[in-house]
Amino acid sequence: MAGDRASKLLALSGLFPVYKAKGPTSAQVLSELKGKLLRGIWLKEYVKKRKQTLKIGHGGTLDSSASGVLVVGIGDGTKMLSTMLSGSKKYTTVGELGKATDTLDASGTVTEEKSYDHITKEDLESVLKMFTGDIMQVPPLYSALKKDGKRLSSLLREGAEVEAKPARPVTVYSLSVSAFQPPLFTLDVECGGGFYVRSLVSDIGKSLSTCASVKELTRTKQGPFTLEEHALREGSWDIDTVAQTLQEYTSLLPAEPSAKRLKTLDNDQNRSDHLSEYV
């Protein structure tokens, strides 16, 4: 029975989205998912005989203080995770005017407070034009970006001095205000890869002659997967449900890349900390 389940697990291949709750890191969510899929299976002994490997990873870090869609690749699906990293994403974020933090969100230490009484909804909507389209953005210091192989956020927490990364080109496809109740405001954002909503909210605050930070952040869509329609909740993290989900969602995915492209993506993923393996 365990052998049959191990065989079924190793046969899983494709992309599927899970719901990441606020609190755990993306890596911790992936670890919890793997633990549930491996429950009752002596996989290490099984793969030694079959010389197979379980590959599983996620397609883009979601902040621990954020919630929403986290796309998971399993089997050959890990070769497609690069398309999730670079592809379109949608977020809903609640920003707070008049308060800046070192992490640019509510998880950090307050570094500055300023008046925001002068700001109207019209003012906010007006500055959003500056942040739509192809723009330059400086990533947050507290981020998953790396220096000498270590994440900037880890270096900062260890007390190391870290220089800000240079501004880089990013794309914002759409940006709108859905609520304005000072000091809080809610934005709906659709963006491309490498974009940081925390930097956006901070930059918006500066453009309004105040400061701002993210209070809440939810990823509502990544690639073709939406939070409401597709994301598997923790209670559904089992082999049979994942197998059925992979089959149902195949039609949502783009055509598979060429063999040469697959090899390149596979090499990229083997170097990525988004990919974990059981051998």
Image (cartoon, rainbow, N blue to C red):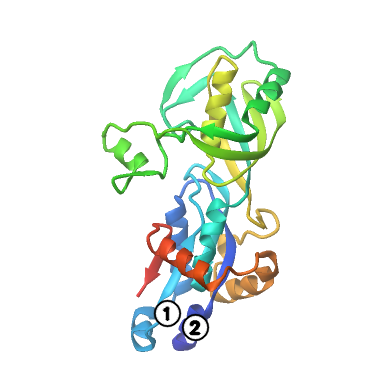
The residue at 35%/40% (across/down) is 152
Give the CA distance from mark 1 to mark 2.
Answer: 7 Å
Q: Position of residue 259 (x, y in %)?
A: 53, 73
Mark 1: secondary structure: loop
Image vertical order of residue 193 relative to residue 131, above or below: below
The residue at 52%/66% (across/down) is 261
The residue at 52%/34% (across/down) is 198
The type of residue carrying mark 2 is Arg
The answer to whether the residues at label 1 and label 2 have Cβ atoms under 8 Å apart is: yes
How many numbered dots are placed on residues in this image? Answer: 2
The type of residue carrying mark 1 is Ile
Circle 2 is placed at which residue position?
Answer: 5
- Tell me which label, 1 or 2, sits earlier in the chain: 2
Circle 1 is placed at which residue position?
Answer: 41
Q: Position of residue 156 (x, y in %)?
A: 32, 36
In this image, 79 relative to 254: left or right?
Answer: left
In the rendered image, the quadrant that contains the C terminus is bottom left
Q: Position of residue 179 (x, y in %)?
A: 71, 29
Where residue 225 sits, quadrant-wise, is bottom right
